[in-house]
């Protein structure tokens, strides 16, 4: 408990220090806009982005068969990681003087390449999984279409 | 806060329900651990970067290792970018907690949840504005630097408070095999008869995850973050530049193979530099024995070469071969020594960085450069003369020099 109090107190002090500096050194009009950004960030994340992700996840669970599901899910996680970074780059490309050496790539094309690689890797891993199942099925005919990891595939959702 | 007393004991009909067995305190604790480490690195390297701009007079910035700022600021921006997908996955893993009922059990619980709101909002804004700054994009009215800096304290403070509040959960989560941990839903585990025990109850079978497993989710997240790092870090780890498909900066595309933070045009010195080319330029050196020196005289002095990286606060850096005269030689001629404090001033008429101070060990190591990678400086790199010192934030290497003051 003492550790928790010490960590918590340090956190409160650091946070209050940051708030104090913000309120004493940043003009009021800027603080209002910052507050708008802070609220908007949570609203967009919790109200828009997260429901979409949860909805996509639920749709995958419902419509994609278990054997392929994990590769689709993993592929989408990797793809989304790349997309969130690529989108602002695409928006900003070619906006600065060329001598700065900044934002001079075709980020849309690069993102397409990366998504292609991610899809290819996911497909190859899925194909290996299917091939292994086929092999196991031939050796053990009774176990065909019954994956060890999904033995108990009663719905948990 | 008295409102919650009147709330019904159960949530409204059609209240969101979460059942994915992927979510677990065991998973969240692992994501939180790496996220906390990244945030800690970002905060510490951010403080080091701030110190570059406002050092204490009794503890000047060191001159070695020459790549010090290159490393710390490269880490700052790289971990910051890596943290964006990591934070999104971590927040996904606890999304059901947003819908716990009642929203607040007590005043203290309500305050704790408000601190989580502050944590999430400051983390999102800090990371997004940091990334946009790297992209030279400022769709907000406030001054980026102080807000980024002070909001960092709010963020790190709310992280520490969060760790303190959740320490028992963290201990449970990290102490439990990821496949066997509880299922995290909108119902707190102690009230949920269907949740797996939070106390390592091994009588329950581990939750079944169809499709992706929890371990698989961690691996996929690691792969996503790894791919983002691998394709962006080339802007500072230059050997990885060829695979930098998402790298904002590419040193090879910069003028004279070195990127530029602020062009002559942006600094409004283009016309002044035309005058320099016409011969109207002298470096004015002030001190005990003031003097002026022309560009021809500087070029005739014994040249010194140095290989210092130029490392920008925006997270790009590249090693550069510089040629010029030693700042210390200029300072000594004005009656100064290696212990002098030196101010260098630019032709740039305005701007926050049209002057900078050189202190301590950097005075002996700094160059006033005329050449970059073997060629004369072009306008955007600071023609006719610029400061370059080791372990120094890029923008503090003042360009288009007009005056050196030995203080």
Image (cartoon, coloured by chain):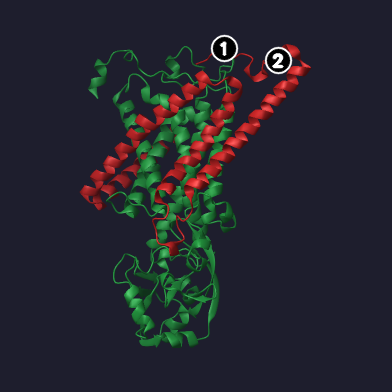
Residue B89 vertical position relative to residue B357 in the rendered view, above or below: above
Question: Is A84 displayed left or right of B351 in the figure?
Answer: right
Residue B370 vertical position relative to residue B28 in the rendered view, above or below: below
Q: Are marks 1 and 2 in contact (CB under 8 Å)?
A: no
Residue at numbered disc 2: A144
Q: Which residue is drawn at 41% across and 24% down?
A: B96
Please tell me the numbered disc located at residue A154: 1
> Label 2 lies in what chain?
A
| Mark 1 vs mark 2: in front | 2
Q: In which quarter of the image is residue B118?
A: top left
Taking the image as drawn, is residue B382 in sight?
A: yes
**Which percent across, then down, holds residue A136?**
74, 20
**Which percent across, then down, holds residue B347?**
33, 75
Going from the N terminus, do you reach mark 1 or mark 2 first? Answer: 2
Q: In which quarter of the image is residue B385?
A: bottom left
Please tell me the numbered disc located at residue B211: none
- Bin the neighbour count of mark 2 within 10 Å (Cα to Cα): few under 14, some 14-19, many 20 and up: some
Chain A, hue in figure: red
Q: Is label 1 in a helix, a strand or a loop?
A: loop
Residue B334 vertical position relative to residue A89 in the rendered view, above or below: below
Q: Nearer the viewer, residue B334 or A133?
A: A133
Q: Nearer the viewer, residue B213 or B173?
A: B213
Residue A90 vertical position relative to residue B34 in the rendered view, above or below: below
> Label 1 lies in what chain?
A
Q: Which chain is green?
A: B
Q: Nearer the viewer, residue A149 or A6?
A: A149
């Amino acid at each position: 408990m003492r550790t928790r109090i010490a960590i918590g107190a340090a956190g409160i002090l650091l946070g209050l220090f940051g708030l104090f500096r913000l309120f004493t050194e940043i003009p009021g009009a800027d603080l209002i806009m910052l507050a708008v950004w802070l609220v908007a960030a949570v609203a967009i994340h919790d109200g828009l982005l997260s429901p979409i992700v949860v909805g996509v996840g639920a749709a995958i669970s419902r419509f994609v068969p278990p054997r392929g599901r994990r590769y689709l899910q993993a592929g989408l996680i990797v793809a989304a990681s790349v997309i969130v970074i690529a989108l602002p780059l695409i928006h900003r490309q070619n906006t600065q003087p060329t001598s700065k050496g900044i934002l001079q790539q075709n980020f849309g094309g690069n993102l397409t390449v990366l998504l292609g690689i991610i899809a290819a890797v996911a497909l190859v891993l899925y194909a290996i999984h299917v091939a292994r199942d086929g092999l196991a099925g031939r050796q053990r005919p009774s176990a065909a279409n019954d994956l060890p990891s999904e033995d108990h595939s009663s719905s948990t959702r | 806060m008295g409102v919650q007393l009147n709330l019904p004991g159960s949530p409204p009909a059609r209240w969101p329900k979460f059942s994915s067995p992927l979510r677990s305190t065991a998973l969240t604790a692992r994501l939180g651990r790496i996220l906390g480490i990244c945030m800690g690195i970002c905060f510490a390297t951010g403080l080091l970067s701030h110190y570059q701009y406002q050092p204490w007079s009794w503890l000047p910035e060191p001159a070695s290792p020459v790549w010090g700022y290159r490393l710390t600021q490269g880490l700052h921006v790289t971990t910051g970018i890596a943290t964006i997908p990591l934070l999104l996955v971590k927040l996904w893993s606890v999304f059901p907690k947003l819908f716990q009922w009642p929203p607040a059990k007590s005043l203290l619980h309500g305050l704790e949840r408000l601190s989580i709101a502050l944590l999430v909002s400051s983390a999102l804004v800090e990371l997004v504005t940091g990334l946009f700054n790297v992209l030279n994009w400022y769709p907000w009215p406030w001054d980026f630097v102080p807000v980024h800096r002070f909001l960092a304290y709010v963020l790190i403070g709310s992280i520490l408070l969060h760790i303190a509040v959740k320490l028992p959960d963290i201990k449970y989560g990290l102490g439990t095999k990821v496949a066997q941990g509880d299922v995290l839903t909108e119902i707190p585990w102690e009230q949920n008869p269907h949740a797996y025990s939070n106390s390592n109850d091994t009588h329950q079978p581990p939750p079944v995850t169809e499709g992706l497993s929890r371990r698989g989710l961690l691996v996929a997240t690691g792969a996503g973050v790894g791919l983002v790092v691998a394709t962006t870090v080339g802007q500072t780890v230059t050997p990885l530049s060829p695979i930098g498909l998402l790298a904002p900066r590419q040193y090879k595309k910069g003028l004279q193979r070195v990127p530029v933070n602020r062009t002559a045009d942006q600094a409004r010195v283009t016309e002044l530099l035309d005058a320099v080319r016409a011969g109207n330029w002298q470096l004015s050196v002030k001190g005990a024995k003031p003097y002026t020196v022309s560009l021809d005289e500087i070029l005739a002095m014994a040249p010194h070469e140095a290989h210092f990286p130029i490392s920008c606060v925006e997270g790009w850096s590249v090693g550069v071969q510089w040629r010029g005269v030693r700042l210390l030689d200029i300072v000594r001629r004005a009656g100064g020594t290696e212990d002098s404090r030196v101010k260098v001033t630019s032709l740039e008429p305005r701007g926050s960085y049209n002057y900078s101070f050189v202190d301590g060990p950097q005075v002996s190591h700094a160059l006033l450069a005329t050449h970059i990678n073997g060629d004369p400086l072009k306008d955007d790199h600071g023609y006719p003369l610029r400061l370059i010192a080791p372990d120094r934030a890029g923008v503090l290497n003042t360009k288009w020099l007009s005056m050196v003051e030995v203080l």
